[in-house]
Amino acid sequence: MATHKITKNFQDLTFSDDYMFMLLMKRKEICKGVLERILGIKIEYLEYPKVQKDIDLEMGLKGVRLDVYTENRESMYTIEMQNVNLHLPQRAKFYESIAAVNDLEQGEAYDSLRKNIVIFICTFDPFKKNLPLYNFTYTCNQDKDLHLNDGSEIIFLSTKGTLKNITPELENLIRYIDNGDTGDTFTKQIDAEINRIKTNKALGRQYMERRMLVNKYFDYFMEEGIEEGMKRGIEEGKAQGREIGKALGVEEGKAQGIEEGKAQEKQNLQQRTIKLYKEGTIDENVAAKILDIAPEEFRKLTQQQ
């Protein structure tokens, strides 16, 4: 769910803005170049990247929409652009797990799973350690030299870390994402592509329509007092919890009341979003983004109403 309005004009978009990021990463050579610099390897072949890729699992399981997904015979790559530090470790674990499930066909052996790399490009330092790269793989707690070698890796790139112990190519990419400096041929190529995209009037109209829809739903919920409703639901949950706690003499009653208040809050948000969708105020993709679910999940919700 969006937490603020979209205020940027199309001509002001940069690499780190979601809309521009997805347009850029659809270009295979740019996507490949970004991956090579973050991973420090040469990639011989890469499938054409898919942006806003939906992975929908069985009914009752949470699907996901990935910013950018691409692959080759050996590896799968999920790339996310992040401007807000919110549940990143948990999301990274979920994305890595769901990509692995999606990769394995029924009856296939486990050793057919490909390398599974999840990358978050962050415009902040997610762990406050002043590093430009944070690479995570599974190792044994008792013996740090013992690696699980399951093929999974989670990487957080920070544009705010100290640029030490990295390649000049990656340093140039980080500087470009952070402040627009074009220090080499590749970052100049990205910058030229951004300028070319900005001359496309159709893409500009598409962005402005998206901005209008997102801001419209944001205003709608503000006018309807959704934030106040959320707070009220939690407060009512707390009050109910206190009453249960008094009756039963246990603190668990308070927790139960809070959870019930949150559940009611979620239900109210779903109902309001579906109402906006059916009125034609927002489209399916915006509705799914509001509820933080895949479009397929949202369709199932509307069918249940």
Image (spheres, rainbow, N blue to C red):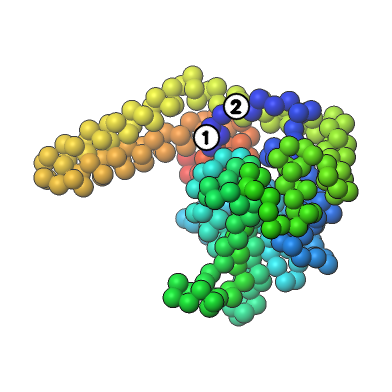
At a point 64% along the width and 48% down the height, the residue shown is 162
Mark 2 neighbour density, 10 Å: few (under 14) some (14–19) many (20 or more):
some
Q: What is the quadrant of residue 259 in the picture?
A: top left
Q: Which residue is at the front of the view, 295 or 29? A: 29
Tell me if residue 228 comes above or below residue 114 in the rendering. Answer: above
Going 36% across and 29% down the picture, which residue do you hit? 231
Disc 2 on helix, strand or loop? loop
In the rendered image, is residue 45 in sight?
yes
In the rendered view, tell whether residue 141 sits above or below residue 46. Answer: below
Q: Of tags 1 and 2, which is closer to the observer? A: 2
Q: Secondary structure at mark 1?
A: helix
| Residue wearing tag 2 | 5
Q: Residue furthest top?
A: 223
Give left or right: position of 85 versus 263: right
Q: Quadrant of residue 205?
A: top right
Position in image of residue 261 (x %, y %): 32, 37
Dot 1 surroundings within 10 Å: few (below 14), some, or many (20 or more)? many
Query: Could you tell me the amino acid type at mark 1?
Result: Ile
What is the x, y in percent for residue 253?
20, 44
Front-most of residues 227 and 198: 198
Query: Residue 155: x percent and y percent?
Result: 62, 58
**Residue positioned 61% across, 40% down in the render:** 83
Return the x and y of residue 7 as percentages of the image width and height: 66, 25
Image side of residue 97 versus residue 182, left or right: left
* Count of numbered circles in the view: 2
**Image mark for residue 274:** 1
Q: Can residue 281 be seen? A: no
Give the residue type at disc 2. Answer: Lys
Q: CA distance from mark 1 to mark 2?
A: 20 Å
Horizontal relation, residue 91 to residue 69: left or right: left
Point out the tag, 1 or 2, that comes first from the N-terminus: 2
Please tell me which residue is depicted at 58% across the width and 45% down the height of the picture: 125
